[in-house]
Image: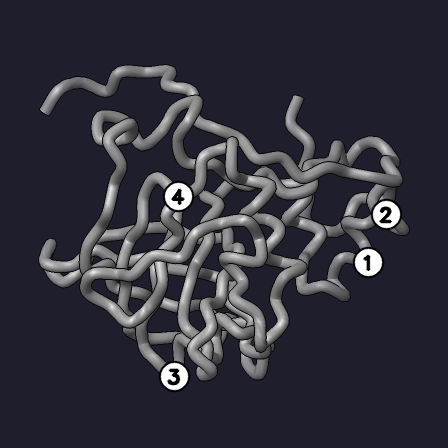
Amino acid sequence: MKHHYKDMPENLKGTYADYSHNFGFNWKEFVMTVPSPLLLVTTYKSNGMPNACMQSWATFTCANKGNGYYAILASVNKNGHFYKSLKETGDAVINFMSAEIFTKCMATIKNNQFEVDEITASGLTPGKASWVNAPLVEECFMNLESKYVWEKEIAPDDDHVLLCLEIIGAHIDDEHLSDRTGENGILFNIHHQQNPELTEKTGHDWAAVLTKKIDMGEY
C-alpha cells in the first residue's frame, strides 16, 4: 500500500519537521528524504583566512555540449562567509571527505569566526590550489577546483540561492583513483528521516555511503 502526501501529515505537526521551516526546511524534506552528497567547500575570506563551509543539496552535471562539468549547489546562504567570499574571488574548491575525517569537517560549522582559519581550527590542513584562488583540504580524498558561473533565487527574495560552479580540475588520492564511491568514498546526507505515520519527537541525520547493487553494463 502506498501513502499519499500533499499536506503535512497530522503526526508531524509539532515535531521538528513542522517547525524546521524556521531554519529554511520544508516538512517534505523529512518525508521524501532524497540523499545528496556531503561537501566541504573552501574559499578565501577577504582577510586572507581560509573559509570552510559544509554543503549538501547538490548535484553534478555536464553542459555546454559536453565541454563543461558543473556543480549545482541548491541551498547557499547569502549571509554566510562562503557566499560572500565566493562573490569576492569567484573561486572555490569542493572537497570530498571520507568517513574517518567527517567529524573534523563538521567542526568547521563551529569554527566559523571571520578572523579564524576555519580549516586549521578544525584539525585539517589547508593546501594551495593549482588553478584557482582558494584553499583545498589536504585530508579530503578528492578536491575539485571551481569557478563561479551564476546564481538564482529559487523563490523570490529568499535568503538562499541556487549556485553554479564550473569545475576546472581535480585532485584525487591514490586510494580513490579506481573507486570514489563505496565504504571509504563519497558520503551522502540523509537528512532527518522520519516515519510520517508515527509521531516522533526526534529524528536523526545520517552520513551514508553507496552500495553497488546492479551492474548496468559495460560501455
Q: Position of residue 117 (x, y in %)?
A: 52, 66
- Left or right: 76 as drawn, with respect to 193: left
Mark sitting earlier along the chain (2/4): 2
Q: Amino acid at mark 3?
A: Glu
Q: Amino acid at mark 1?
A: Tyr
- Left or right: 106 as drawn, with respect to 74: right
Badge 2: few (under 14), some or many (20 or more) residues near its Cα, within 10 Å? some
Q: Residue 88's mark?
A: 3
Mark sitting earlier along the chain (1/4): 1
Give the camera-side residue of 113 and 163. Answer: 113
Q: Amino acid at mark 2?
A: Thr
Badge 3: few (under 14), some or many (20 or more) residues near its Cα, within 10 Å? few
- Left or right: 58 as drawn, with respect to 114: left
Q: Position of residue 195 (x, y in %)?
A: 75, 32
> Cβ–Cβ below 8 Å for labels 2 and 4?
no
Q: Position of residue 67 (x, y in %)?
A: 10, 58
Badge 4: few (under 14), some or many (20 or more) residues near its Cα, within 10 Å? many
Element class at badge 4 = loop
Q: CA distance from mark 1 to mark 4?
A: 34 Å
Q: Amino acid at mark 4?
A: Cys
Q: Which residue is mark 4?
A: 140
Name the residue: 88% across, 40% down. 201
Mark sitting earlier along the chain (4/3): 3
Mark sitting earlier along the chain (1/3): 1
Q: CA distance from mark 1 to mark 3?
A: 34 Å
Badge 1: few (under 14), some or many (20 or more) residues near its Cα, within 10 Å? some
Q: CA distance from mark 2 to mark 4?
A: 35 Å
Q: Which residue is mark 2?
A: 15
Q: Which residue is mark 1?
A: 19
Element class at badge 1 = helix
* In front: label 3 or label 2: 3
